[in-house]
Image (tube, grey):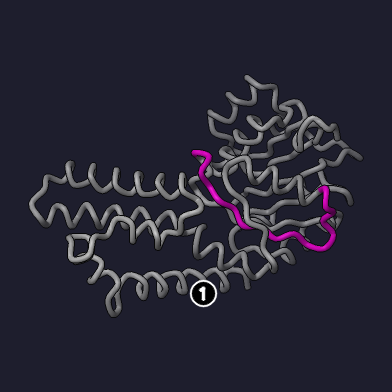
Amino acid sequence: MSNDGPLQGISLTLAGVGKMGFALLEGWLKAGLSPSATTLIDPYPADAVRALCADRGISLNPPVAKGVAADVLVLAIKPQMLDHVAEVAARTGPDTLVISILAGKTMADVAARFPQARALVRAMPNTPAAVGRGITGFYANDAVTPAQKALAEALLAATGSVVALAQENDVDAVTAVSGSGPAYVFLLAECLAGAGVALGLERDVAEQLARATVQGAGELMYQNPATSPAQLRINVTSPGGTTAAALDVLMGREGLQDLLTAAVRAAHRRARALSG
């Protein structure tokens, strides 16, 4: 590897180029990953994937070259396809770093299909990665070297923020909070628009207001990382005002905190069940 940047000089194989895989790939290329050192494995690549490969000189579904192992293999296939990865496993060696973003698949699951690889990372990104605002929690096993861990962080940070986890089980909690979290926010916008319609607003007006409010509030948090969400809430709440009246409902008994906690716990239970 060269010293020009963490992604310079590495060879990378990406197995599975769906929406998340494609978002990661675009982030890596912007961060300096060499197209000529990149291999994509996908039996049914989308037209956009084929076009990108043709335009950038990225290898798509080449035959396995004996004795040639990638520095990094990223698994972004559908979880149920993990049992059909013999051709992908043949592209790994003892020094290959394997990064799995497969929901519900443990390191033990991955290790059983990739016996040659020792260094394993399990990660959980989320869909805002597609616009560079994702966040990924990841756990690295003991075989991952400091250099490989730094490389994994650089790869995962290409589409947003990264959080290193203390234990593999924490990946299930990350799945429940941020992996599934965008859907909770979208539901908030949906419900806010519905409440506006109930007050007499036209549907398109209510949806425009709700969407812009969620977007703006998110951007405000993004641009003020040192200010807690609780403090931001306090900043826009005047005592005895309209916001306070609404928060009395949302923060009351069996309010939003209790409901969201129950929802995240349900997602966590399902993640644990899928992980075995």
The picture quadrant where one finds residue 91 is top right
- For the N terminus, the image quarter is top right
Residue drawn at point x = 77 percent, y = 51 percent:
149
* In this picture, residue 52 sits left or right of residue 116: left
The picture quadrant where one finds residue 121 is bottom right
Could you say where residue 116 lies in the image, as x and y percent from the top left? 86, 54
Closest to the observer, 16 or 128: 128
Residue drawn at point x = 68 percent, y = 67 percent:
168
The picture quadrant where one finds residue 34 is top right
* In this picture, residue 232 sits left or right of residue 147: left
Against 63, residue 127 (above or below) is below
Q: How many marks?
A: 1
At mark 1, the secondary structure is: helix
31 in magenta? no
Could you say where residue 178 lies in the image, as x and y percent from the top left? 50, 58
Residue drawn at point x = 65 percent, y = 46 percent:
156
Toward the bottom, the furthest residue is 253
Could you say where residue 255 lies in the image, as x and y percent from the top left? 30, 74
Residue drawn at point x = 56 percent, y = 63 percent:
174
- In the rendered structure, which amino acid carries the disc numbered 1? Arg
Would you name the residue on which mark 1 appears? 269
Closest to the observer, 232 or 215: 232
Q: Mark 1 Cα within 10 Å, few/some/many (few <14, many 20+)? A: some
Toward the left, the furthest residue is 200
- For the C terminus, the image quarter is bottom right
Closest to the observer, 271 or 49: 271
Could you say where residue 73 lies in the image, as x and y percent from the top left? 75, 45
Against 34, residue 157 (above or below) is below
Toward the right, the furthest residue is 67
Segment tinted magenta in the rendering: 131-147
